[in-house]
Image (tube, helix red, strand yellow):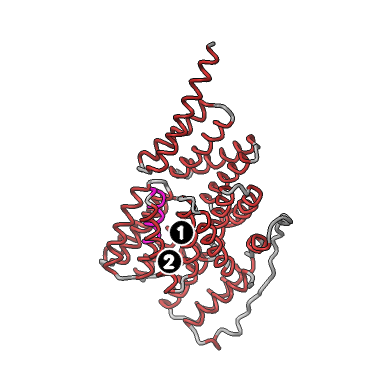
């Protein structure tokens, strides 16, 4: 399997081939470097498949040199407009590889120096995407609105679709699922008018995700599979791996364990082969949740810990919060209630600070379950009620039903305890 830098170098070389004759850049120096991060030994009990999936390393410093040299070479050899198109593509390669800081620098360079309105709008959307991934919602929305004003000048339907899609993603990350769904539907309307396949696939994916959250699992799988077909046709393997992640999660929600693990493993293989670390962290987290569901607690912990390591490297705050939630559940299952409470409180704090209402609700459910296990009915009911109120607002009927059943039992137990204390 190619290491991270080798693959990254090949991606850049492929991009260079689109803009130059190969002889013009084939003497360019590429320092292949070697991975420097030492990963902890993985448990001897892990089978060969799991060991191969978890045995990865992330390389950074040589990639910084790679980017700088590529930009310098392109700037010297391309006309101004072509140069900015080139580095826009380069920034998107960086995002696909999880190199958010490098991508941000490039988008900022384009935004400040180009006079091309379309390139400026695309750079603003790129910056909005990065800010969204870092949970800087206010800045992300502001950048989208700035891009939207440019697209409005040219009556660019695909541009409108891109903006609404990004606003939907931001709303979803903030936990406003109905608002997200409305944005995605608006986006799909403009995308259909523009007839852009990849844009349609992105929106189909997002509609699949929000419908899965709302419990509309059949509708969700239709959207997700439609997106997967397009991504396979266009050869967008990063999106293919993301599609397998989302399809697997939808199966997991319906307790279809066999199909869920098949989807996750297919996504993991693609992400590993192409070093899509951002997607890989989410796939590892999803597989951890699946392993929890089948009570393979030790392996669930291995995958959650690896996901956490990757997410810290990428500074992916929301994924980090999700992982702490899962680590809290794992600790609870291992009867380490003190550590479970600590992890869940960290998750709650991060999600609250990032104003992610959906994740706050999900973590609150787990805290409610923990305090129920600790016979602290007051705190249990408090956290479960907070989550219930959110799910009622978003009309997530499946979640509402499950929490109501837990609360009914909690109220019965609470009343029984109060009666016993009075006697």
**Residue 356's x, y, as percent?**
45, 45
**How much space separates mark 2 and mark 1, taking CA atoms?**
9 Å
In contact (CB < 8 Å): disc 2 and disc 1: yes
Q: Main secondary structure of the magenta part?
A: helix
Q: Pointer 1: residues within 10 angstroms few (<14), some, or many (20+)? A: many
Q: Earlier in the sequence, mark 2 or mark 1?
A: 2
Residue 383 lies, with reference to residue 71, above or below; the image says above
Q: Residue at x 59, y 51 (%)?
A: 291
**Which dot marks residue 352?**
none
**Residue 103's x, y, as percent?**
50, 64
10 displayed left or right of 106 = right
Q: Which residues are magenta?
A: 204-215
The quadrant in which the N terminus is found is: bottom right
- Residue wearing tag 2: 228
**Residue 234's x, y, as percent?**
42, 74
Say what secondary structure mark 2 lies in: helix
Q: Tell which of 190 and 233 is nearer to you.
A: 233
The quadrant in which the C terminus is found is: top right
**Residue 183's x, y, as percent?**
32, 54
Quadrant in the picture for residue 278: bottom right
- Residue wearing tag 1: 247
Quadrant in the picture for residue 114: bottom left
Q: Pointer 2: residues within 10 angstroms few (<14), some, or many (20+)? A: many
């Amino acid at each position: 399997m190619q290491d991270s830098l080798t693959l990254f170098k090949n991606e850049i070389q492929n991009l260079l081939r689109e803009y130059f004759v190969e002889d013009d850049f084939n003497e360019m120096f590429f320092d292949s470097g070697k991975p420097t991060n030492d990963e902890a030994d993985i448990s001897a009990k892990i089978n060969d498949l799991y060991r191969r999936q978890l045995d990865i390393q992330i390389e950074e410093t040589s990639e910084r040199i790679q980017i700088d040299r590529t930009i310098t070479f392109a700037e010297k050899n391309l006309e101004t407009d072509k140069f900015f198109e080139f580095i826009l593509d380069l920034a998107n390669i960086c995002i696909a590889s999880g190199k958010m800081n490098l991508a941000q620098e490039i988008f900022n360079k384009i935004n400040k120096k180009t006079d091309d309105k379309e390139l400026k709008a695309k750079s603003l959307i790129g910056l909005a995407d990065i800010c969204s991934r870092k949970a800087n919602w206010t800045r992300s929305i502001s950048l989208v609105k700035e891009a939207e004003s440019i697209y409005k000048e040219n009556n660019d339907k695909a541009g409108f679709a891109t903006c609404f899609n990004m606003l939907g993603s931001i709303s979803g990350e903030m936990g406003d699922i109905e608002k997200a769904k409305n944005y995605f539907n608006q986006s799909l309307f403009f995308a259909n008018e523009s007839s852009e396949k990849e844009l349609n696939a992105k929106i189909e994916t997002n509609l699949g995700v929000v419908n899965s959250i709302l419990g509309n699992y059949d509708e969700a799988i239709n959207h997700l599979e439609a997106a997967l077909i397009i991504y396979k046709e266009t050869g967008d393997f990063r999106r293919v791996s993301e599609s397998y992640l989302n399809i697997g999660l939808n199966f997991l929600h319906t307790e279809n364990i066999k199909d869920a693990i098949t989807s996750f493993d297919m996504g993991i293989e693609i992400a590993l082969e192409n070093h899509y670390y951002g997607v890989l962290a989410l796939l590892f987290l999803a597989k951890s949740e699946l392993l929890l569901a089948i009570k393979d607690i030790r392996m669930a912990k291995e995958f959650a810990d690896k996901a956490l390591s990757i997410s810290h490297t990428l500074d992916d705050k929301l994924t980090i919060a999700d992982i702490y939630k899962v680590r809290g559940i794992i600790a609870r299952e291992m009867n380490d209630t003190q550590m479970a409470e600590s992890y869940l409180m960290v998750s709650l704090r991060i999600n609250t600070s990032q104003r992610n209402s959906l994740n706050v609700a999900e973590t609150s459910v787990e805290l409610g379950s923990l305090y129920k296990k600790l016979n602290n009915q007051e705190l249990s009911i408090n956290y479960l009620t907070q989550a219930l109120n959110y799910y009622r607002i978003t009309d997530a009927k499946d979640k509402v039903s499950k929490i109501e059943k837990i609360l009914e039992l909690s109220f019965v137990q609470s009343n029984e305890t109060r009666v016993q204390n009075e006697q």
